[in-house]
């Protein structure tokens, strides 16, 4: 029932970034250590021009992380808040987008386990790295939310190719940190996994125009920078989540950003127009 509702809402918005995938399966309510691959997984996306959120399922025996952001993270209105977030509530998760008229979209993935799930940690521009927890052998940490709050639009974050947030291991701990030319607040959380399949980083070039000869006429053509790069096989309980995201997010384009999808038996990292994304695949 949930997926039909999500799809109906997406179609009503006519937003290409919207969608939901893989119907709700039986849930594993065990909160102990997992010794096998994830028994199920779900994929969701939500793209809007006015703030809203969708219910993406139970938080009992399930864990969800952010797997993408697309569109415009820079408002033209002073005092505006913008953001994307996978939010954990007592009994459910929501996927939310905060915006004030610009096109902004979020992607999320969920797995059928809550083993070792931690509370979220928060970091904002100018802070020291936020420790999320010890880097134990089976703990992995991923992004859950990205926000910008600033009264002056030019001070909002994700304004250059090098602007980023990331989770990483340093000094024996998982930590959340970043480099930003404006204000960004990032959220991340952790869980235990049975195995680490691998990590990938992909970076797109920039959209551009070029002159080409179509004899006897010289034409100006658009060169689309979009990349769709394969990562791990989407089988045996594997799933992939974001560990970093970077770039200049200021285009009202549902395809312009960083997000993880599935195609041809693989997880795919989609990047465009100078954006970069890193993911770790686990099971």
Image (cartoon, rainbow, N blue to C red):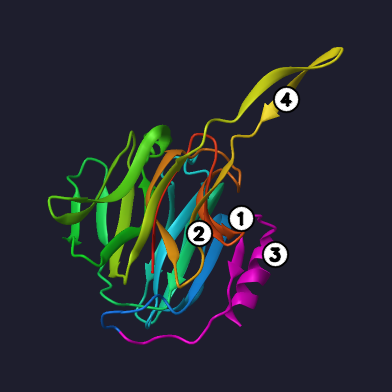
Return the disc, 3 or 1, that comes first in the chain's sequence: 3
Instruction: Please give the residue where the numbered disc 4 appears in the rendered image.
Output: 221
The quadrant in which the N terminus is found is bottom right
Confirm whether residue 113 shows in the render: yes
Confirm whether residue 154 shows in the render: no
Instruction: Please give the residue where the numbered disc 3 appears in the rendered image.
Output: 12
Foreground residue among 99 and 132: 132
Instruction: Please give the residue where the numbered disc 2 appears in the rendered image.
Output: 107
Per the model, the C-alpha gap separating discs 2 and 4 is 31 Å
Return the disc, 2 or 4, that comes first in the chain's sequence: 2
Return the disc, 1 or 2, that comes first in the chain's sequence: 1
Foreground residue among 194 and 126: 194
What element does badge 3 sit on? helix
Residue 73 at what x, y percent from top left?
A: 47, 44
What is the residue that sits farthest to the left in this orientation?
171
Q: Check contact, mark 3 vs mark 1: CB within 8 A.
A: no
Q: Residue at x 26, y 50 (%)?
A: 168
Residue 13 belongs to magenta span: yes
Of circles 4 and 3, which is in front? 4
Per the model, the C-alpha gap separating discs 1 and 4 is 25 Å
Q: Badge 3, how many Cα within 10 Å: few under 14, some, many 20+?
A: few
Q: Check contact, mark 1 vs mark 2: CB within 8 A.
A: yes
What element does badge 2 sit on? strand
Q: Which residues lie in the magenta part? A: 1-30
Residue 15 at what x, y percent from top left?
A: 66, 56
Instruction: Please give the residue where the numbered disc 1 appears in the rendered image.
Output: 17
């Amino acid at each position: 029932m949930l997926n039909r509702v999500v799809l109906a809402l997406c179609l009503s918005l006519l937003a290409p970034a919207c969608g939901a995938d893989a119907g709700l399966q039986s849930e594993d309510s065990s909160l102990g250590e997992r010794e096998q691959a994830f028994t199920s997984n779900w994929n969701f996306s939500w793209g809007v021009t006015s703030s809203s959120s969708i219910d993406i399922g139970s938080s009992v025996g399930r864990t969800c992380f952010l797997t993408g952001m697309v569109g415009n993270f820079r408002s033209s209105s002073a005092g505006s808040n913008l953001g994307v977030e996978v939010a954990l509530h007592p009994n459910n998760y929501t996927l939310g987008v905060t915006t004030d008229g610009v096109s902004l979209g979020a992607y999320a993935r969920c797995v059928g386990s809550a083993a070792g799930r931690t509370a979220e940690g928060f970091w904002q521009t100018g802070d020291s790295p936020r420790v999320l927890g010890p880097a134990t052998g089976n703990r992995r940490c991923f992004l859950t939310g990205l926000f910008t709050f600033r009264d002056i639009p030019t001070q909002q974050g994700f304004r250059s190719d090098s602007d980023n947030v990331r989770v990483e291991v340093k000094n024996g701990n998982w930590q959340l940190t970043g480099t930003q030319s404006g204000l960004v607040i990032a959220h991340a959380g952790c869980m235990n996994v049975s195995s680490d399949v691998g990590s990938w980083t992909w970076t797109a070039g920039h959209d551009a125009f070029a002159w080409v000869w179509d004899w006897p006429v010289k034409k100006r053509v658009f060169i689309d920078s979009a990349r769709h790069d394969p990562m791990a096989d989407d089988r045996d309980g594997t799933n992939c989540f974001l560990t970093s995201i970077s770039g200049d997010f200021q285009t009202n384009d549902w395809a312009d950003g960083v997000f993880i999808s599935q195609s041809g038996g693989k997880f795919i990292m989609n990047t465009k127009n100078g954006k970069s994304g890193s993911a770790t695949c686990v099971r």
